[in-house]
Image (cartoon, rainbow, N blue to C red):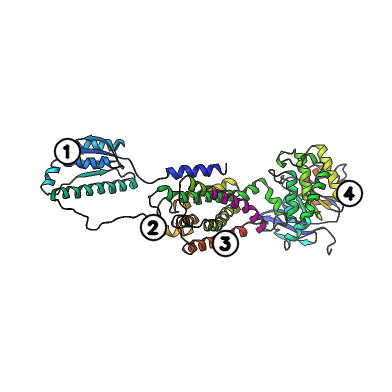
Amino acid sequence: MLFVMPFVQLILLGYAADFEVKNLNLHVIDNDQSQYSRGLISKFSASPYFNIVNYSFRDQDGMKDMKKGNADLILEIPSKFEKKLVNREASPIHLSIDAVNGVKAGLANAYSNMIIRDYNFELLEKSTGKVFLPPIGITTLDWFNPGMNYSTFMVPGILVLLVTMVGMFLSAMIVVREKEIGTIEQLNVTPIKKHQFIIGKLMPFLLIALLELTIGLIVAKLVFHIEFQGSILLVYAFSLVYLTAVLGIGLLISTISETQQQAMFISWFFFVIFILMSGLFTPIESMPAWAQKITWFNPIKYFIEFMRMVLLKGSPFKDVAHQFFIMAIYGLVINTLAVWNYRKVSE
Amino acid sequence: MKHKYIVQVSKLTKKFGSFTAVDKISFNVSKGEIFGFLGANGAGKTTAIKMLIGLSKPTSGDAIVAGFDVVKEPEKVKYKIGYMSQKFSLYDDLKVFENIRMYAGIYGIPKKEINSKIDNLIQELGMEAMRNNLVGDLPLGWKQKLAFAVAMVHNPTVVFLDEPTSGVDPITRRQFWEMIYKASEKGTTIFITTHYLDEAEYCTRASIMVDGVIKALDTPKNLKENFGVKSMKEVFVKLARG
């Protein structure tokens, strides 16, 4: 169970958690019915990002479609579209985008602008016989992820989440569970040292989490065909430092909780914040300044940065020394707090 | 040993806020004694024991257990004592021999000796057939006997038993007391709390605690004579009713 669940999650999320927007539904209102307007529409229909779902001649029909959720955007071409263009006049067209989902709307806008701009140049070339180029040509080259493959981007991040989950939740349960069943009392009357107890408790989870990481890396390689650029040894070395910190967080939670429910609740509280502020789903750069400061305390953020740098870019140790250093300090502080907070004697 | 008594308690007090759970109790326990620590529910027995074994910090007063101060050197005390809590607290998901091995290891018994120790203990308990059973699957009586054996695994000077026989059938209780006598004969001091007042008759000496205070402490025989009654039960009822 412990190993099957993360495996399923990795495969499921690796394929499904994809932010690329495809299949935008387009409603077309063509009041011109000309060669030029049909040309523009065919550009849209040829694009993999748009599906033309409906044609009509009235605004209301388009809005109706959008309100029902059948159309994501409405393209309205006014009459005399072709005539104005032939006369070298500006010929506006109207594009309405459903912005309920902001990310989707932004992409829909960008895609449509691109298509319209290209069509514009094409028409100009045709009418003047000259080749028009945009003033500055931007050619993008996607380094480190040449196919702009989403799973390449997501899978290392999801793997980080899974490893963190195992580490944090299992370790949060341990001391609390012993408190609940009473075995902790028996241990506390023995001369066992605090650090012996804690190392003994954390070691198994460290091994489980590393095993999970190994399975995850194999899945990433065999199922998602991700080429690892950097040193796998470096990944394990960092994971060891990272897990020490994460297990420490779990342990600290379990020393302050009295019941497993309490420990679970606190763990979730932190885990959700850690995930959503990790840079996996929303870039940290786009967060407000105060929120960016909070992410300094987010271990997941450092691991995701590390994984992307080492696995995808092949960064050597000196480029990730910063992350190493921070996690080492983090682990030291958290575990010291946990050991200090775990008391054999009650007041 | 610089102290005459195995357990030496003087004005030991524990307060929780304004509530005084244990109020200036003083007593001494000699080597090899079976010391009965009696009292109604909530009288403060468990709180007192927890202070003696270093699980709970006294608010004031002193306690010397097995030659060490429980406040200043609690970890040294812990090498010398065994403890069996009210609540069964061995690991249910470990096997019988694994539980013994784990505690033997914690108490620092050398690896070479652990295996023979396990064999001896299991043989003494008559648990050969259950050696590889999970502790969680054992009947309660067996669990309690095993817990006692584990509490004794490091040959402690004194062993604290907090209601070891509650919920156990009469035959197992009898066997349990045989184990206690055997340990006492070997020189181990026994500190025991119980609800069964017939068991109080087996103690060398017994104390009766009411509302955090020790109301009486003597041999069962003297206690009965002083109160002019025939059984410890009657002594207890007289005291507890105030």
Q: Chain of mark 4?
A: B
Question: What's the residue type where badge 1 is placed?
Answer: Asn
Residue A332 circle label: 3
Place of residue B12 in the rendered image (x, y in percent of width and height, measured from the top left): 75, 58
Q: Are marks 2 and 1 on the same chain?
A: yes
Q: Secondary structure at mark 1?
A: loop
- Whole-angstrom CA distance, mark 1 to mark 4, is 114 Å
Task: Report if residue A268 is visible in the image.
Answer: no
Q: Nearer the viewer, mark 2 or mark 1?
A: 1
Q: Earlier in the sequence, mark 2 or mark 3?
A: 2
Q: Earlier in the sequence, mark 3 or mark 1?
A: 1
- Whole-angstrom CA distance, mark 3 to mark 4, is 60 Å
- Whole-angstrom CA distance, mark 3 to mark 1, is 69 Å
Tell me the crowding category of disc 1: few under 14, some 14 to 19, or many 20 or more residues within 10 angstroms, Cα based. some
Q: Nearer the viewer, mark 3 or mark 1?
A: 1
Residue A285 circle label: 2
Q: Chain of mark 3?
A: A
Side (left or right) of A252 relative to B232:
left
**Given contact means CB atoms under 8 Å apart, are the residues at marks 2 and 3 in contact?**
no
Q: Residue furthest left?
A: A87
Extent of the magenta region: A195-214
Name the residue beneath numbered marker 4. B222
Q: Does the magenta portion include A201? A: yes
- Whole-angstrom CA distance, mark 2 to mark 1, is 44 Å
Place of residue B185 in the rendered image (x, y in percent of width and height, measured from the top left): 88, 50
Name the residue beneath numbered marker 1. A31
Tell me the crowding category of disc 2: few under 14, some 14 to 19, or many 20 or more residues within 10 angstroms, Cα based. few
